[in-house]
Image (cartoon, rainbow, N blue to C red):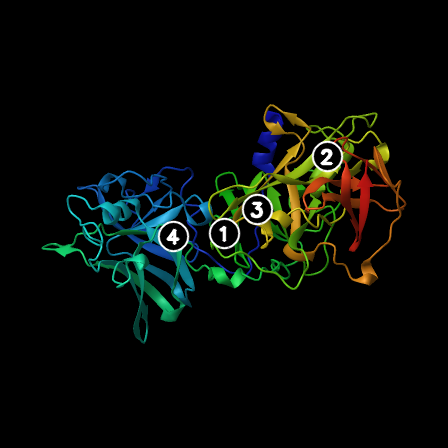
Amino acid sequence: MNMKNISLILVLMIGSKVSAQRDWLASFEAELGQTDTFWNGSDRSGKIVSSKLSLSNDFNPDWQTWSGFAVSSMRDSTTKGYTNEYSAITASGVSYSNNYAVFGIGGKIWLDQPDTIRGCYVTNSTYAYLSMRDGDQFSKKFGGSNGTDPDYFKITATGYTASGTKTTEFLLADFTSSDPTKDYIIKDWMYFPLDVLGAVDSIVFSLSSSDTGQFGMNTPAYFCVDDINALHPDFKRNIKMVDLSNVLPMDTFDNGAEADGGFYLGGYYFTNEYNPQWKTWSGFALSSMNDTIKADYSNQYSSVAGIGQDESYLVCYGRGTVYLPHSPINYTFYKTAIPTVTFEFSNSTWAYYAMKDGNQFAKKFGGEDGTDPDFLQINILATFYDGSKSDTVNVKLADFRSKYPGNHYIHKKWVYDPIVLENLFNPYSNRPTPVKLDFWLEGSDTGQFGLNTPAYFCMKNVFKPDWFGRVPSTNSVDWRVYPVPAHDVIQIETDVPLQYQLMDINGRICQTGHTSGLIELNRTLSGVYFLQLSTDGRRTVKRIIIN
């Protein structure tokens, strides 16, 4: 993409934002623009505002000290001592997000109007964790030299209402059990329920410890907090689809101008980065726009597939991240033989016509003679609860790489890939729970500044439960597949374009794509496979042999 294209997009990608009453989450993702930095109140603003919450901050310029809350993206989980006061022992926010808040003496949160805060995630700061684990010149090692001292480190949250106060507690470390195997110091993000406090005006946090001296608590008075008002992570154990119906009035969009870093939808957090100076955004936006014709940058919020009445969908521009509930508990599904989840995706109107016809910045896919091997695909990378990552999986938005022109396509409908996420969400696999999904586009038409093809795609029915190989008989279609056994190609008797997945007997995906009747086989394949064919909710699975 050339500089002229970028300038036009920055100046002209401006539109009205329409807000609807939606769920909220104080995630702190909009507070810091980079990792390994912090904000401690040195601008003397006196508070942090994140979504519907304000968090107290008191900065002393004479001593360069602070109390209340700071915001951090520090990643240091190893350095001991007070010079590392802004780091969480987890070295990240919840679900490997960037930012979190740090409590440091006398922190208070408050709302503009009374509300019940469901809960938040808390963990130890690196400073406090290492002090309790090893001891230091000011604080004791928890448990003492023989591990039997009944030590503890505790958060107390006091909720204030017009009618009085209520309190609830959370132990960041506990050595009080008679069974030493039950002693612990928290080293992960843990959920702290706050709904027991009821509808509050404010909540004041305080810390207490068994290790005290002449001047009060010896244990460093810090803890870290993130995702305030998050739903309890166990609520998603039975995974549910993100409901986007009636989120926005028809033909409107929300590009994140007031979303504070993202959208909290059904317990999932969809990131958004909004630049108020340029009125531009990246990540995810919400849309109910229904313009399937206009083919330029002023139509960046529309799906070329269109939508029905009262429907909304997500638009992704650049790179978007979805944070899932942070829990080691793997997802369960309804009674299915092979459970999975899926999502529907489509091209944006702008991207579709850029690929179909070309424009001043992007090429026509296939070139003038239709032989250029162009493609555009959504890449998806999962991060799991233990920090490990999946292989990158992808779904195609357009593909001209087949030597058979009849297999070339640019999607103009809402489509779905029924098992692209199967390995990520399968509770019977040996993998831990996914807590983060990154989405980005990759394509063949690139230039000095990345993709020339408009880097947008749309999706809806996110995390829709799906049943691989288990289709109601009314939706099952017996497309004829030949030859048997197959060698270089598989032919299918069909009069409609089909999605296909070729899997081995262990359920691993070996080949995937779209076809109008012919599938070129990878020359390395041989043995028994399963071929799944689907279109418009109809599906069949065939057992095939490849020689």
Q: Quadrant of residue 399?
A: top right
Q: Nearer the viewer, residue 162 or 224?
A: 224
Q: Give me the C-alpha separation between circle 2 and circle 1.
A: 30 Å
Residue bearing the label numbered 4: 49
- Measuring 57% from the left and 46% from the top, which residue is drawn there? 284
Quote the CA–CA distance across marks 3 and 2: 21 Å
Residue 485 % position (x, y): 86, 40
Q: Which residue is mark 2?
A: 354
Q: Disc 4 to disc 3, how far (Cα)?
A: 21 Å
Q: Earlier in the sequence, mark 4 or mark 2?
A: 4
- Pointer 3 residue: 284
Q: Give percent across and percent down for residue 503.
A: 72, 44
Give how far apart the Cα atoms at labels 1 and 3 are: 11 Å
- Above or below, 204 against 28 in this view is below
* Amino acid type at image mark 3: Phe
Q: Amino acid at mark 1?
A: Ala
Compared across the picture, whether 376 is left or right of 105 comes to right
Q: Amino acid at mark 2?
A: Ala
